[in-house]
Structures are given as structure tokens and as C-alpha cells.
């Protein structure tokens, strides 16, 4: 059994900022600004980026800036700090430069290492390359008198070799020949991955790479690590960013790269349960959020229509027309609707199941009911969902995330109380404990 070295169970946000900006009076302005982020604008993991985000000619100065800014402001930063250094699987020179950068940043005399949680290693190759980086960090800990394993290591998956290496990681961790137990995050880097795979798209855009994201999530789950998706570079496309996160969360990948404080806010909130519950309707293949009016769920679109006809109903979906009696209509609409529970709903259900379990019952039925209105025709819908221990544990995942956020991000307590209310926050912190 591999012993986990970190307290964090989840990472929602991975925010990078250049360590040195050329042509500025203060070359450290970007990381100095990032170090002052608080609340929902502050990421769970901040990455002063001394690799791709910083010009090669500025990287020595970038190391100095990391040391200066983190030693001054790191104690007050609410998230974890994991600088990214240079590395490359095919370049011994670059790997040595990365070693030197980590050695300087980790020197206790410089005052930064007490606020730094780990390092991010880019461009790794096969598992032997991961071991080289890990060995360098072990050497650095011994050189500076730090306890072995105190510096976490995360890698960016940017090539086929590193993608395959995730399958080897679980068997390698815990062996006495390495300290890979220090591993923390597996982060996708789709841009370099696309280059390594020699992939081409007609528009030149990046492929979506759902397989990579699935493999990274699976590799992280198998090894007890945290999976993080790569950057979404269309920073104005907020809806696309949200869709990407929703797709990721269904794969168990709850973290994502953020390029701006605005993306940080979106990514910090996205995996948390919603403030309000709501009903969704499948309207000819399109998922539509229903509006609530006086307790009734209303569909007001043109992709689906409903009218009474004699003793029955006529439902039109796209070009299809279906004649249904009352029971058939109810079943059809039940198949087309889903309920998205709020935090309050989830906590209510968990508390009810905990009480039932305490009373010796292994499963209970939870009712979901609503009145749906389409073209003025109202239909009462209700369905029961069986809750057993497996259902309860699945529902615990978003609540565990919330509990992890609340425990590790006290700077967000006020925001969370404003989102959910103090009462719901208190109840959410009690369930499952």
C-alpha cells in the first residue's frame, strides 16, 4: 500500500503565471500580482512558471523572482505553491538546468522553501525519466537538510511516453529504489502532446483528446494522485470552458488549468454542487434547463410541443408526432427529464439515508417530483430513486470535495456561506463524518 504524502484530496484550479517579464521595471510583476490573489480568485495550486510562460533568456531572473516573491508573500497565499521548472526527457542539459533551478529555489537560506509545496516537472518521458526527476528532488532535500518526501512532485503529460508511463506508476511507487510516493498531480499538456503525436486537424485547432484525459484520470485514480486537465486557451469562451469542465468531471478529472483569474473563479466553482436545483428536458436531442414559475417547471421552446387531443395527447418532437394517453405521456416525459440536485438536496438525501442506516435499513426510496408545463398543458411527474450504500458513497464525492475545499481554503469560507448559507455549509461539513 502506497502511503500518500499530501493532505489535499482535490485540486480544482492549476494557475500558471510567468516568473519574469521582459521589458518591465519589475520583471516579477505577474507573479507578484498572482501572490496577492484571495478568495475565489485564488487557485488551489499556483504555479510560478519558469518554463513555457517565461522566455529562456529570463529564466535565471525568474528563479530569483520566485525566491523573492514567495519568501515575501508565500506565507499569506491561501493555496499551494508548486513552481514549474525546465526539464526534457531527451536533453540531459535541460534536466541539469531544472535541477539547478530547484536547488536554488529550495535553499532554506533564501526563505522560499518553507512556503513551497512541490515542483512541477514538464516534458517527462518514460517512468525512468520520472525517477530521474524524483532522484534530483531527493538529492536536493538531503543537500538542504530537508526531510525526504517533504517536496511534492507533479508531472505534465505531454507525449506518448509519459501517457504510457502512467500505467507503470502504480507498480513503481513504494519500491525502496525510489521516492515516487512524493507524486502529487498528473497534469495534461495537450499542446505539446499534439506535437508529439504529430496530429493534424483541418483548422489547426487542438484535437479534444478525450482519451488522454480519461487515461490521466485513470492513472491518477490508480496511484492515489490528482488529475488536472490542460489549458483552455480561448479565455473569452466561458461557456466552452464550462462545458470542458463538465465533460472532465464525468471522467473524474475535477481539476483544470486556469490562465486568468477569471478562469480560476469559474474552475473553483464548477465542481461544487449547485446553489439551486433544477430540471433538465431533452428537447429533440438538446438538453434544456426548465424555468420555474410558481412551482411549475416550464418549457418555452420550439423543439418540442404538446397539445390535448380528445382523450389523449399529441407530442411533437422535431418532425415526429406521437399520440399518447396520460400514462404514456407521463412515461415519455419522465424519460426526457432529469433533476440536477442542489447542495441542499444532496445533504438532505444523505442525512435521510444516514438516519435510515442508523435504524437498520440498507436501502430507501427517494422521490423526485415536479409539475411540467409545455404549451400550457401541465403534467405531474414523479419517480423514485433507490438509495443504498453505493449510491450514498457516489453522492459523497461532491460533498467530500466541498469538505476538502472548506478545510484547506479558509479564505473562501465567506464565499461558500454566501453561495449556500451558513446552515447548509454546517450540515455539509457534518455528513459522512
Image (cartoon, rainbow, N blue to C red):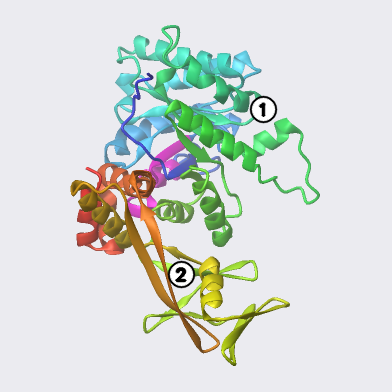
- Mark 2 or mark 1: whose residue is earlier in sequence: 1
Residue 210 sits in which quadrant? top right
Query: Does residue 147 appear to the left or right of 241 in the view shown?
Result: left
- Is residue 306 something one can see in this rendering? no
Q: Which is more toward the observer, 391 or 361?
A: 361
**Residue 244, x across and y down, in percent:** 56, 52
- Residue depicted at 53% across the width and 47% down the height: 248
Q: Is residue 87 left or right of residue 272?
A: right
* Quarter that holds the C terminus: top left
Q: Which mark is residue 160?
A: 1
Marks 2, 1: nearer the viewer: 2
Q: Residue furthest right?
A: 202
**What residue appears at the point 48 percent right and 42 percent down from the top-left corner?**
252
Q: Are marks 2 and 1 in contact (CB under 8 Å)?
A: no
Report the Cα–Cα distance between label 2 and label 1: 41 Å
**Number of marks in the image?**
2
Q: Which residues are magenta?
A: 29-48
Picture coordinates of residue 285 (x, y %)?
A: 64, 66
Foreground residue among 81 and 216: 216
User: Looking at the picture, does residue 51 appear above or below residue 87?
Assistant: below
> Is 4 one of the magenta-colored residues?
no
Find disc 2 in the rendering and name its residue: 279
Helix, strand or loop status at disc 2: strand
- Residue 46 falls within the magenta-colored stretch: yes
The residue under the point 33% across, 25% down is 113
Amino acid at each position: 500500500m502506497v502511503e500518500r504524502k499530501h493532505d489535499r484530496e482535490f485540486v480544482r484550479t492549476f494557475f500558471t503565471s510567468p516568473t519574469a517579464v521582459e521589458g518591465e521595471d519589475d520583471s516579477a510583476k505577474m507573479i507578484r500580482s498572482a501572490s496577492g490573489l484571495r478568495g475565489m480568485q485564488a487557485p488551489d495550486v499556483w504555479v510560478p512558471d519558469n518554463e513555457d510562460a517565461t522566455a529562456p533568456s529570463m529564466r535565471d531572473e525568474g528563479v530569483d523572482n520566485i525566491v523573492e516573491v514567495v519568501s515575501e508573500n508565500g506565507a499569506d497565499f491561501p493555496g499551494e505553491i508548486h513552481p514549474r521548472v525546465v526539464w526534457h526527457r531527451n536533453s540531459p542539459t535541460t534536466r541539469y538546468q531544472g535541477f539547478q533551478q530547484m536547488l536554488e529555489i529550495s535553499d532554506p537560506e533564501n526563505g522560499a522553501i518553507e512556503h513551497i509545496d512541490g515542483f512541477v516537472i514538464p516534458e517527462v518521458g518514460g517512468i525512468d525519466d520520472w525517477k530521474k526527476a524524483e532522484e534530483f528532488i531527493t538529492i536536493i532535500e538531503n543537500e538542504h537538510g530537508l526531510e525526504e518526501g517533504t517536496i511534492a512532485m507533479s508531472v505534465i503529460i505531454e507525449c506518448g511516453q509519459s501517457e504510457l508511463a502512467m500505467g507503470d506508476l502504480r507498480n513503481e511507487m513504494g519500491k525502496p529504489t525510489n521516492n515516487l510516493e512524493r507524486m502529487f498531480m498528473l497534469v495534461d499538456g495537450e499542446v505539446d502532446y499534439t506535437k508529439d503525436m504529430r496530429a493534424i486537424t483541418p483548422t489547426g485547432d487542438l484535437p479534444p483528446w478525450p482519451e488522454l484525459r480519461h487515461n490521466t484520470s485513470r492513472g491518477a485514480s490508480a496511484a492515489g494522485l490528482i488529475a488536472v486537465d490542460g489549458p483552455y486557451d480561448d479565455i473569452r469562451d466561458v461557456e466552452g470552458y464550462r462545458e470542458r469542465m463538465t465533460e472532465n468531471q464525468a471522467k473524474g478529472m475535477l481539476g483544470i488549468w486556469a490562465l486568468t483569474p477569471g478562469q480560476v473563479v469559474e474552475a473553483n466553482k464548477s465542481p461544487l454542487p449547485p446553489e439551486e436545483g433544477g430540471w433538465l428536458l431533452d428537447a429533440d436531442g438538446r438538453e434544456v434547463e426548465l424555468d420555474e414559475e410558481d412551482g411549475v417547471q416550464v418549457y418555452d421552446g420550439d423543439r418540442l410541443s404538446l397539445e390535448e387531443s380528445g382523450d389523449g395527447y399529441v407530442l411533437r418532437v422535431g418532425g415526429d408526432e406521437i399520440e399518447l394517453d396520460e400514462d404514456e405521456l407521463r412515461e415519455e416525459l419522465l424519460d426526457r427529464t432529469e433533476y440536477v440536485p442542489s447542495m441542499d438536496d444532496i445533504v438532505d438525501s444523505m442525512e435521510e439515508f444516514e438516519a435510515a442506516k442508523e435504524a437498520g435499513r440498507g436501502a430507501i426510496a427517494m422521490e423526485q417530483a415536479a409539475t411540467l408545463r409545455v404549451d400550457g398543458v401541465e403534467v405531474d411527474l414523479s419517480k423514485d430513486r433507490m438509495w443504498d450504500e453505493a449510491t450514498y458513497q457516489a453522492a459523497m464525492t461532491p460533498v467530500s470535495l466541498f469538505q476538502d475545499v472548506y478545510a484547506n481554503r479558509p479564505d473562501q469560507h465567506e464565499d461558500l456561506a454566501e453561495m449556500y448559507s451558513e446552515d447548509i455549509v454546517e450540515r455539509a461539513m457534518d455528513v459522512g463524518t
